[in-house]
Image (cartoon, grey):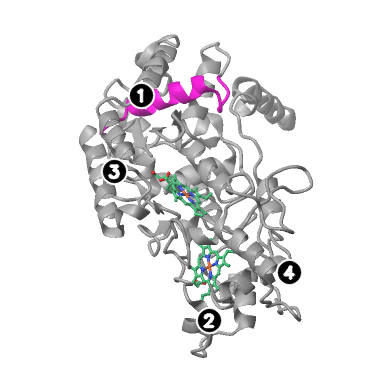
Amino acid sequence: MKRSLTLSLLLGMSVFAADYSSVIEVPDAAKIIQKDLLPPLGVNKMPTECITTDSKAIARGAYIFHNLNGENAKGNAPEGLSKTVENGKPKQYGNCVACHNIEGAVGGGNIGPDLTNYTEVFVKTGVRDAQYVYAKIADPRVDNPHTDMTVNLTTKLFNEKEICELASYVLSKK
Amino acid sequence: MRKVLQIALSVLVASSLAYGSEQFSMSDADRALYEELLDNNPADMMLASGSEHLDALGGTASLAKYLEQSKDSLASYLAGFPRYIDKYKSVVSIDQMLQAFMHDSGKKPYALKSSDMFDISSYVKSIANEQPINIDINANEHMKKAYALGKEVFNTRRGGRGLSCYNCHNPGVVGRILRTQPLPDISAKGNASAATWPAYRMTKSNLATLQKRFQGCMENALLAVIPLGSKEMTALEVYFTHEAKGAPIAIPGLKR
């Protein structure tokens, strides 16, 4: 008896208390975020024959460095680099210049260090080596878990070959 | 209100001097336009249309009554959104509250992303102009949770470039240059984001809400864009609004 009374009270309440779940839009975002999360840092060992002086590879690295994506990039992409991906959407590039100054930078940012004359300043002084440059571009958490730099290999934005081209460009004589 | 915008402008000009005009995002022509628009914000027209939408629902008086506020307390109450409303059993932004208000007034609610909703919700927030933001993230468990979630979403690295909001909006990088654009201080005096959105965006020629602006950064930085009104979006708004607590509301803002 007591039980059914409580039940009917509850029923009554749900009749009177308006249910706003069909009135107020609250779409789900948890799944979108879950799928979008950054995987943990892995080991990014530089492939053999990664750093090259091949001018075509360096040209690709430079193009990826200085542009945001295939849609807003000016001029033709260098040989071996596409402006679009399979589904026809613009290919994303590195937009490294948004944060770094470097030789020939147009509107270079200053969130990251100036990479001008990199080999002279950073490598010949013994501060950095090629493996570091590769690993840093692949996933900058390598020496700074709280880095503000973009993650380029772990996110699959680029493949190992493209990271090598970027590193080759940074290390090249300009 | 115009004064607040002028402070924002002078901060912008100051930072352009500090970093050299070549790196600055606004050309002289843009800056001239900005100054002109300060006295004649195109978004005023959208707010006027929002005011008409509210009139069709009985105007400010019926909104105040619906929210159980007096004519005098309404502005300060509106300056406390997003807030937990028991009747809805959730933390809501002004636009979501308006959806419920429209429904309870026998009208079909505007969709969150419709321009009608942008107009009316911007107008309703502007009723609180000059009121200091008084969000209370400790008001109850729901607000505490929303704030914690907002902070988590803000700090979560994700997307094509593995960035979080925090990477570009932390004290260490404020004022630094991201490809010609100075990174803004989202809680700066006189220009705190939550107090200056909804705003007219000169680069987009439209009125955008704070949540819409969040979506803009997600898109630019390759974070998957999450929908307006989702728990996570509202939580981000709670987080940003708390960052601007005490700042006088100045709607519509004017942004690059």
Horizontally, residue B109 falls left or right of residue B140, namely right
Residue range corresponding to the magenta coloring:
B110-130
Q: Which residue is mark 4?
A: A160
Instruction: Give whichever of discs 2 and 4 has the lower sequence position.
Output: 2
Q: Which residue is mark 2?
A: A119
* Element class at badge 4: helix
Location of residue B201 in the rendering, given as x and y in whole percent from the top left corner: 41, 34
* Element class at badge 2: helix
Residue mark closest to the camera, 3 vs 1: 1
Residue A168 appears anywhere in the view: yes
Residue A40 appears anywhere in the view: no
* Element class at badge 1: loop
The image quarter containing residue A64 is bottom right
Residue mark closest to the camera, 2 vs 3: 2
State the CA–CA distance, disc 3 to disc 1.
Answer: 23 Å
State the CA–CA distance, disc 2 to disc 1.
Answer: 51 Å
Residue type of the residue flagged with mark 2: Thr
Chain under numbered label 3:
B
* Element class at badge 3: loop
